């Protein structure tokens, strides 16, 4: 079957359909809590809540698909934010500053990739270490006060609107989602990512450069963290070493809840996007219901557990069904 035919015959998975139903239920709950929820302007503005973690989640997605993890992305974002603040204070044009920051953040991501893939070190331990190292570097660059005075051109992506109602950052998010969907599901590069996640040894045997592939995925994630930093300074008007601290739970939850197997080899961009919409809707609804931050953290943790346990439960269910079918076949044969 040709690739175009596969795209035309594509259908959402059962889990993706379930996520759509959960989004509708969460939206109905939020509308019940507040009559202003269904206002189109409010809905579009509330979407800005998940754009920054969403960009980080899109960066994390290909890494998890290869069977690895990166929990340093929020610290990478902080470095990007304070670098943008430093360059803005120095009078550097954003047309020059943004590519420089994206390159620096991609390089920091590639460092993780080299340590994990080329040196063969465990990704959780490595990115836990770089999470602290990069956060410390962000504090050094941003000093104690950080940056709050930005040139307006630096803030336009995170605070601007298209047609006066659609946030520019939301358009950026959707554009990144489309590009990531094409890269992961419509290119040779994407097929190699899935192959490595399913069996890295077999991928090496057929000629895939697993080391380089993983370094590229980590560099991509770093670049998206730099892009998220640009949105951050526009939304919040500040750049400090503690930017996005604690957001890793939301990011990992979005990826795993979106149906991505934490062991690699399975997952879709659509699933992650739907999970982000669900988490954003729930956060908006909990905000309308005045649910405290600790309770919201408990909800995120529970959803993360659901995402991790879901594939395990499915595999156990299919194993039981297969065993029962074999038992019936043997009984019929006797």
Image: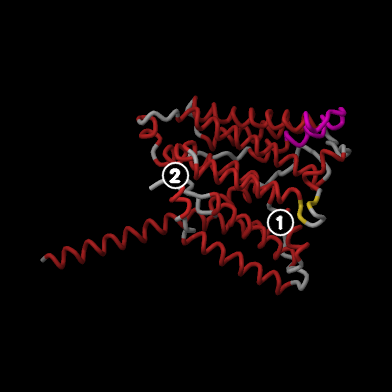
Name the image quarter holding residue 216: top right
- Give x and y (percent) for residue 121: 50, 30
Using the image as rendered, state which of residue 266 and residue 121 is in the foreground: 266
Horizontal side of 333 relative to 294 (left or right) equals: left
Judged by its main secondary structure, the magenta piece is helix
Residue at disc 2, secondary structure? loop
Q: Which residue is mark 2?
A: 265
Residue 12's x, y, as percent? Answer: 49, 58
Residue placed under numbered mark 1 in the picture: 47
Q: If the image is split into quadrants, where does the C terminus sit?
A: bottom left
Q: Is residue 207 above or below residue 151?
A: above
Asked if residue 54 is positioned above or below residue 17 in the image, the reply reads above
- Residue in the image at 75% along x and 40% along y: 230
Q: Position of residue 210 (x, y in %)?
A: 45, 30
Report x, y in % for residue 197. 44, 40
Q: Any magenta on residue 80?
A: yes
Q: How is the image coloured?
A: secondary structure
Label 2 environment density (alpha carbons within 10 Å; few <14, some 14–19, many ≥20): many
- Magenta stretch, residue numbers: 79-96
Where residue 130 sits, quadrant-wise, is top right
Q: Residue at x 66, y 71 (%)?
A: 29
């Amino acid at each position: 079957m040709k690739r175009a035919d596969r795209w035309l015959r594509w259908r959402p998975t059962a889990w993706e359909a379930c996520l759509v139903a959960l989004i509708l239920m969460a939206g109905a709950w939020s509308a019940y809590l507040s009559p202003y929820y269904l206002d189109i302007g409010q809905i579009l503005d509330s979407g800005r809540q998940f754009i920054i973690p969403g960009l980080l989640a899109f960066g994390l997605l290909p890494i998890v698909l290869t069977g690895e993890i990166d929990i340093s992305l929020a610290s990478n974002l902080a470095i990007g934010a304070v670098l943008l603040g430093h360059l803005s204070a120095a009078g550097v044009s954003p047309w020059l500053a943004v590519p420089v920051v994206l390159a620096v953040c991609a390089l920091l991501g590639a460092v993780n990739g080299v340590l994990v893939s080329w040196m063969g070190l465990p990704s959780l331990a490595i990115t836990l270490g770089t999470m602290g190292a990069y956060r410390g570097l962000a504090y050094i660059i941003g000093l104690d006060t950080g940056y709050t005075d930005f040139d307006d051109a630096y803030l336009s992506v995170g605070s601007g609107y298209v047609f006066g109602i659609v946030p520019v950052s939301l358009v950026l998010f959707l554009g990144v989602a489309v590009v990531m969907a094409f890269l992961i599901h419509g290119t040779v590069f994407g097929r190699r990512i899935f192959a490595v996640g399913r069996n890295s040894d077999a991928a090496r045997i057929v000629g895939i450069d697993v080391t380089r592939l993983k370094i590229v995925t980590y560099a991509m994630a770093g670049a998206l963290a730099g892009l998220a930093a640009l949105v951050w300074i526009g939304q919040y008007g500040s750049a400090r070493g503690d930017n996005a601290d604690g957001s890793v739970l939301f990011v990992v939850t979005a990826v795993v809840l979106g149906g991505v197997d934490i062991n690699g080899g399975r997952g879709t961009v659509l699933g992650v996007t739907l999970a982000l919409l669900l988490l954003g809707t729930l956060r908006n609804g909990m905000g309308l219901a005045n649910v405290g931050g600790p309770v919201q953290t408990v909800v995120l943790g529970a959803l993360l557990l659901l995402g991790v346990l879901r594939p395990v439960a499915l595999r156990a269910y299919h194993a039981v069904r297969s065993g029962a079918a074999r038992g019936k076949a043997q009984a019929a044969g006797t």
